[in-house]
Image (cartoon, rainbow, N blue to C red):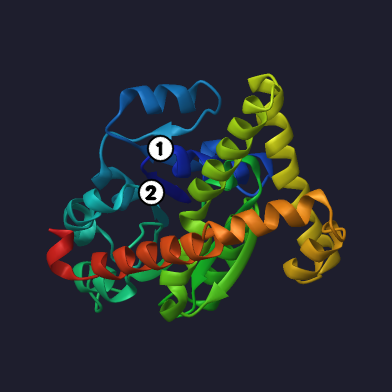
Amino acid sequence: MKVGFIGAGNMGCAIMRGAFQGGFLKPYETMVYDVSEQQLAALTASYPVNVAESNVQIARECEFIILAVKPVYLRGVLEEIRKYCYNKKIISIAAGWSMAMLTDILGRENGVQTLRVMPNTPALVGAGFTAICEENTFSKASLGWAKELFATLGVVQVLPESLFDAVVAVSGSSPAYVYMFIEAMADGAVRLGMPRKMAIQAAAQAVLGSAKMVLATGEHPASLKDNVCSPGGTTIEAVQSLEKNGFRGAVLEAMDACARKNRKMTTPADRR
């Protein structure tokens, strides 16, 4: 079997759907295992993947193994499969798990190739950002394969592991900040009389359009912001209120908190 997924949650399924829809993977060459029968049933209702009986079956029979389990469960999975990983290619998407931590458990002398990857949940709609760790033990061919796989989910960048705290803060966790911003804007619109459903749509579309403007124009966000702020107008009034209430500082502190937590998770004691 070409590819095996351990974990069929949101991210595991997002990777599979992107790869299937893009034609990069075929369901019949993909094997999946998850402890949740409900997750597996939802996946197999859409795609004729092969369902494994255990994590060990995935490790024994698949060439590429994608570990799509929550960080708290990863140690147990790694310890369960490590003796079956000779010459296998292992991809981990778990936050807080460094390359050193992965290789310490999987070993360094059994031919196993290891790669750390950090995608985000917008991959579910093909608009993800995936960071691939520059310090990896994949061969050139295996790394090329991994890049093509994650390119089916959106943008892919190869970055040094030293930047992965920043990656987690700016893309891995940031969709939650953006959802809070959309919710807050929608609440504000509701307060001003707009129906809830319309308010959410308007707020989400504003965020989507603004993000596209940043990417499409290549202009600095500050310049685009200035273009919206007419002298003495409504927008600069709102911007002044955001600044007065610490908008930028709150975002910066949230990202620092996220990065600090990710750094803390990389200590072995926190993985037990």
Return the residue at label 2.
68
Note whether 32 is above or below 42 in the view shown: below
Note whether 14 is above or below 45 in the view shown: below
Disc 1 element: loop
Quarter of the C terminus within the rendering: bottom left
* Residue 97 at least partly seen: no
Q: How many marks?
A: 2
Looking at the image, which residue is at 46% across and 50% down? Answer: 3
First reached walking from the N terminus: tag 1 or tag 2: 1
Disc 2 element: loop
Tag 2: amino acid: Ala
- Picture coordinates of residue 77, whole percent (x, y): 22, 51
- In this view, the residue in front, 129 or 116, is 129
- Distance of mark 1 from mark 2, alpha carbons? 7 Å
Which mark, residue 86?
none
Graded by Cα atoms within 10 Å as few (under 14), some (14 to 19) or many (20 or more), the crowding at tag 1 reads: many
Graded by Cα atoms within 10 Å as few (under 14), some (14 to 19) or many (20 or more), the crowding at tag 2 reads: many
Note whether 231 is above or below 13 in the view shown: below
Image-based side of 9 in relation to 270, left or right: right
Looking at the image, which residue is at 45% across and 38% down? Answer: 10
- Picture coordinates of residue 270, whole percent (x, y): 16, 62
Return the residue at label 1.
8
* Residue 106 at least partly seen: yes
Q: Residue furthest front?
A: 232
Image-based side of 152 in relation to 210, left or right: left
Q: Quadrant of residue 93?
A: bottom left
- Picture coordinates of residue 140, whole percent (x, y): 54, 77
Note whether 85 is above or below 111 in the view shown: above
Q: Are marks 1 and 2 in contact (CB under 8 Å)?
A: yes
Image-based side of 223 in relation to 103, left or right: right
- Picture coordinates of residue 153, whole percent (x, y): 62, 50
Tag 1: amino acid: Ala
